[in-house]
Amino acid sequence: MAKGLGDRVAIVAMGCTPFREHWDKSADDLLVDAVTECMDGVPGLALDDVEAFWVGTQGSGMSGQTLAKPLGLRGKPVTRVENYCATGSEAFRNAAYAVASGAYDVVMATGVEKLKDSSFSGLTATWPPSDGTDVEWTAPGGFSLLAPAYRARYGLTERELRDALTHIAVRNHANGALNPKAQFRKAVSKEAVERSPRIAGSLSVMDCSGVADGAAAALIVRAEDAHRYTDRPVFLKGMGFVAGNGDGLSTDGYDFTTFPEVVQATAEAYAQAGVTRPREQIDVAEVHDCFTPTELVLMEDLGFAERGRAWADIVAGSFDRDGAVAVNPDGGLKSFGHPVGATGLRMFYECFLQLRGAAGDRQVPGARLAVAQNLGGQPGSCVAFTAVIGNEAP
């Protein structure tokens, strides 16, 4: 287990572009917009005062120049990272360790992706050569396996499972309708979700997140310095990351009702943060709802529901904005789409706003502790990131 960074690192400013079809903007433009908003959050601090940068992108850049060029940086270290759909979180993780190590005082993590004009209809990816035994399936195909596995293991009727998945889609779109930066800002009805055409297994179009462009940025400092930059810093309480070895795809009888990588990463983050009763202690959670069954499974992997009971808790409203844990109050991937390199930092952005009481109409009253959970890959072979952040000083 990694040495914890609990209360050693703070976020003092963040920026995030609207996530949508940005036909009139380049990846460079989006990065400049996100970084500008971030820097505006700390008057008196210039971009040249930031000592090191990280940029997360899967397919919109190949090096640190992805960020150095649009920002006009001179003489600065800029590191490009990529880790599937957890790329934005990976940028944050590396930047946080750099500050905690004492190597730098002020650093910035950024993430960006331009997907709509990439000529691909979904997420872009260039796969490395393999021995030919890799499982090849689409993202909807892989994640669609979660739903029948969950139903079979816990003895749900088709109607019970459908009600839970529909509730996730309806709730996240209702939350996104309140968010000016969401791609889809229209509430959807239960009937609209259930009438939408199927694309993989029991998954319909409305069970899937969209495709969008976007960028986000976070300014990170040592915790003891945080109040020099803002009177409302947010502190990193715990963080875990696990890269699975993919054996789930080559194992007979693999359990598609859990992401073991998420369970392990979350246990590490909770241990560092002192979280022992997540449903009672966590106020807000941004989770990786790439597909509605993913969010269903994550409610149990994150400890918000007992095994086999998340479906009932979801239908009962336990993860609505006024529930026990407010899940995806910004609308999640369902409303924002999924520009790969930016998504993880977009999750931090919403947690940052909620913990500062700055989330407007979707504010969760009295939010003190939040979770940002991001994963990449597919069931049976994924990378997983979980962070706990809070607004109480060490």
Image: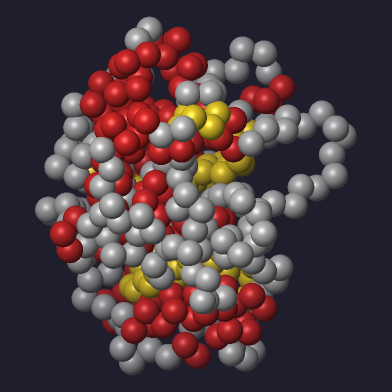
Residue plotted at (27% across, 60% down): 179
Question: Does the image show residue 31?
Answer: no
Return the x and y of residue 342 as percentages of the image width and height: 50, 61
Occupied quadrant, residue 196: top left
Question: Who is closer to the viewer here, 6 or 352?
Answer: 352
**Image height of 261 relative to 7, above or below:** above
Position in image of residue 34 (x %, y %): 43, 75
Note whether 212 is above or below 122 in the view shown.
Answer: below
Can residue 293 be seen? yes
Percent x, y of residue 147 = 46, 22
Instruction: Identify the residue at image location x=61%, y=51%.
Output: 121
Determine the residue located farthest toward the left in the rendered image: 365
* Looking at the image, residue 379 lies above or below residue 375: above
Query: Quarter-wise, where is residue 143 in the image?
Result: top right
- Where residue 186 sits: x, y (%)? 28, 52
Q: Residue furthest top?
A: 155
Residue 49 versus residue 38: which sits nearer the camera?
A: 38
Q: Quadrant of the C terminus?
A: bottom left
